[in-house]
Image (spheres, rainbow, N blue to C red):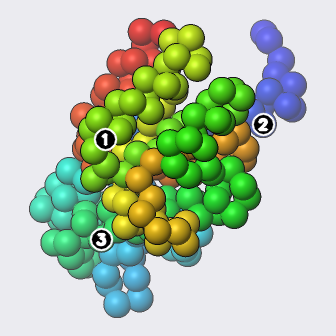
Amino acid sequence: MRLETAEQSETQDERAEAVRRCVVTRTPRPKDELIRFVLGPDGTIVPDLKEKLPGRGVWLTAAHDTVAEAVKRKAFGRALKAEAKASDALADQIDKLLTEAALASFAMANKAGEVVFGHSKAEEALAKGRVVALLHAADAAEDGCRKLDGKAMAATEGRRIPAVCTFSGDELSLASGRTNVIHAALIQGGAARKFLAAASRIERYRKGSAAFLESRSDTDKQ
């Protein structure tokens, strides 16, 4: 019989703690792929994005279509075994909350000096090998995006640099305190990585549950 060390046992406990089952799909997923919900004092379902609210939690895959399906099926009340009111607009409300969280992360990355703005500054950062991702406004011209993406491919000898195209120019301008933000580059750093994680979460949420199947399929191929 193999004896587990205390450290190994603790690691296994942490893995188990980090997985929850979606009440709609019944699929176990890592917590960072789910959203927790609790029952508010007035019986209304409340999203707990930071996972800090008291009370028994219900977990759903972090996807717009899954949240909408949970509302349609009245899945919250069944899971909690209690009367639960969930707004028909809950899926859209979560989209707004996730967007606000991502843009707040972008603002922090900017304050940390981990964002450069405009084509020329982005190109300079690419040449120095400092860029972890490009940022294009959702309403940016395709030609401008294509040119900067091409510069990134050339600067990295074909290595793909991710591009975030989720947010409008107005959203990026407001979050950064600048005007007319269309293109930017994220520089290596902790704040930039946190923004990328938040941006990826909202992108997956909007794509729906299929995005998680694609992600799992890509992982299996590696």
Examine the image and state in which quarter residue 15 appears. top right
Image position, residue 147 (x, y; %): 39, 30
What amino acid is found at the position of numbered circle 1 in the picture? Answer: Arg
Specify the quadrant that holds the N terminus.
top right
Residue visible at 32% across and 84% down in the picture: 43
Residue at the front extreme of this rendering: 120
State whether residue 207 is above or below residue 70: above
Examine the image and state in which quarter residue 29 appears. top left
**Residue placed under numbered mark 2 in the picture:** 10
- Closest to the observer, 66 or 136: 136
> Is there a contact, CB below 8 Å, between mark 3 and mark 2?
no
Mark 1, residues whose alpha carbon is within 10 Å: few (<14), some, or many (≥20)? few
Label 1 residue SS: loop
Mark 2, residues whose alpha carbon is within 10 Å: few (<14), some, or many (≥20)? few
Q: CA distance from mark 1 to mark 2?
A: 26 Å
**Residue placed under numbered mark 1 in the picture:** 26
Q: Earlier in the sequence, mark 1 or mark 2?
A: 2
Residue visible at 58% across and 20% down in the picture: 155
Mark 3, residues whose alpha carbon is within 10 Å: few (<14), some, or many (≥20)? some
State whether residue 50 is above or below residue 202: below
Q: Earlier in the sequence, mark 3 or mark 2?
A: 2
Q: Which mark is residue 93?
A: 3
